[in-house]
Image (tube, grey):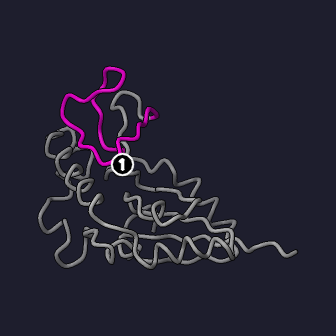
C-alpha cells in the first residue's frame, strides 16, 4: 500500500467569489464601499466598534445565502487521493461546508466571535449577529477576525504545513496580503 502524498493548498478570496462572496480588492469589491481601516483594522474597532460589528454582521448574513462552488467541492473530493491540508485566507466556512476536513483559517472565522478581554475565548455564533453589549465573561464580543494591525496567530502553523507539503497549490489569491504572501 502506498502512502498518499501530502497536498497543501493556500486559498484566497477568488475561490469563494464564484459562490457569490464579494471580494475586497476586485472591481466592485467591498473596499470600494468601505474604508478598509474603518472596518477591518484594530484602530477602526477602537474608533467605531458598532460600524465594524455591522460590517461583519452583513458578511455573516451574506454567507448564509451562498453555497460552496465546484472548486471547494473538488478540494474536498481530492481528500480521497491525497492528504489534503487547506490554508485559507478566507473567513467564510465554504471549505468546511464542501466537506474539507483539515482547514487552517489564517485570518479567523466569520461564524465565530471572541472576547475582547481574552482573545483565546472563542465561541461559535453561527450566522447570528454580534450586537454592541453582547459579552462573554463580562467582555464585549468581537468578530473572530484578524484585522490589519494585529498579529496572525496561525502563521507559524501555516508555515509548518507548507514546509511539509509534497505538492503545494495556490488558488484564488493575489498574494498581496502579508504575511500570508
Q: Which residue is mark 1?
A: 111
Left or right: residue 175 versus residue 81 is left
Residue 83 appears left or right of 141: right
Q: Is residue 57 left or right of residue 94?
A: left
> Quarter holding the C terminus?
bottom left
Image spot of residue 82 (x, y percent): 68, 73
Query: Which residue appears at 70% of the width and 75% of the height?
Result: 166
Which residue sits furthest left? 33
Q: Which residues are magenta?
A: 120-146
Residue under the image location 36 percent in, 44 percent down: 144
Callout 1: few (<14), some (14-19), or many (20+) C-alpha neighbours within 10 Å?
Answer: many
- Report x, y in % for residue 77: 58, 74
Q: Quadrant of the N terminus?
A: bottom right
Q: Is residue 138 within the magenta segment?
A: yes
- Residue 133 among magenta residues: yes
Residue at image location 16% in from the left, 47% down from the top: 54
Residue in the foreground of this view, choosing between 99 and 139:
99
* Residue under the point 37% across and 59% down: 92
Q: Is residue 38 left or right of residue 143?
A: left
- Vertical placement of residue 4 versus 105, above or below: below
Estimate the x, y position of residue 136 in percent, counting from the top left: 34, 26
Would you place residue 23 above or below residue 103 in this image?
A: below
The residue lying toward the viewer, choosing from 115 and 20, is 20
Amino acid at each position: 500500500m502506498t502512502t498518499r502524498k501530502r497536498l497543501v493548498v493556500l486559498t484566497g478570496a477568488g475561490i469563494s467569489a464564484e459562490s457569490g462572496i464579494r471580494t475586497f480588492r476586485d472591481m466592485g469589491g467591498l473596499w470600494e464601499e468601505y474604508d478598509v481601516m474603518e472596518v477591518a483594522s484594530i484602530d477602526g474597532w477602537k474608533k467605531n466598534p458598532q460600524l465594524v460589528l455591522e460590517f461583519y454582521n452583513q458578511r455573516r448574513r451574506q454567507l448564509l445565502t451562498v453555497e460552496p462552488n465546484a472548486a471547494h467541492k473538488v478540494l474536498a473530493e481530492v481528500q480521497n487521493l491525497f492528504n489534503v491540508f487547506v490554508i485559507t485566507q478566507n473567513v467564510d466556512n465554504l471549505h468546511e461546508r464542501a466537506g474539507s476536513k483539515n482547514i487552517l483559517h489564517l485570518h479567523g472565522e466569520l461564524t465565530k466571535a471572541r472576547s475582547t478581554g481574552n482573545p483565546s475565548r472563542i465561541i461559535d455564533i453561527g450566522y447570528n449577529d454580534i450586537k454592541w453589549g453582547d459579552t462573554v465573561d463580562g467582555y464585549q464580543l468581537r468578530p473572530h477576525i484578524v484585522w490589519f494591525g494585529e498579529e496572525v496567530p496561525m502563521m507559524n502553523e501555516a508555515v509548518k504545513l507548507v514546509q511539509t507539503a509534497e505538492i503545494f497549490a495556490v488558488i484564488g489569491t493575489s498574494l498581496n496580503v502579508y504575511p500570508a504572501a
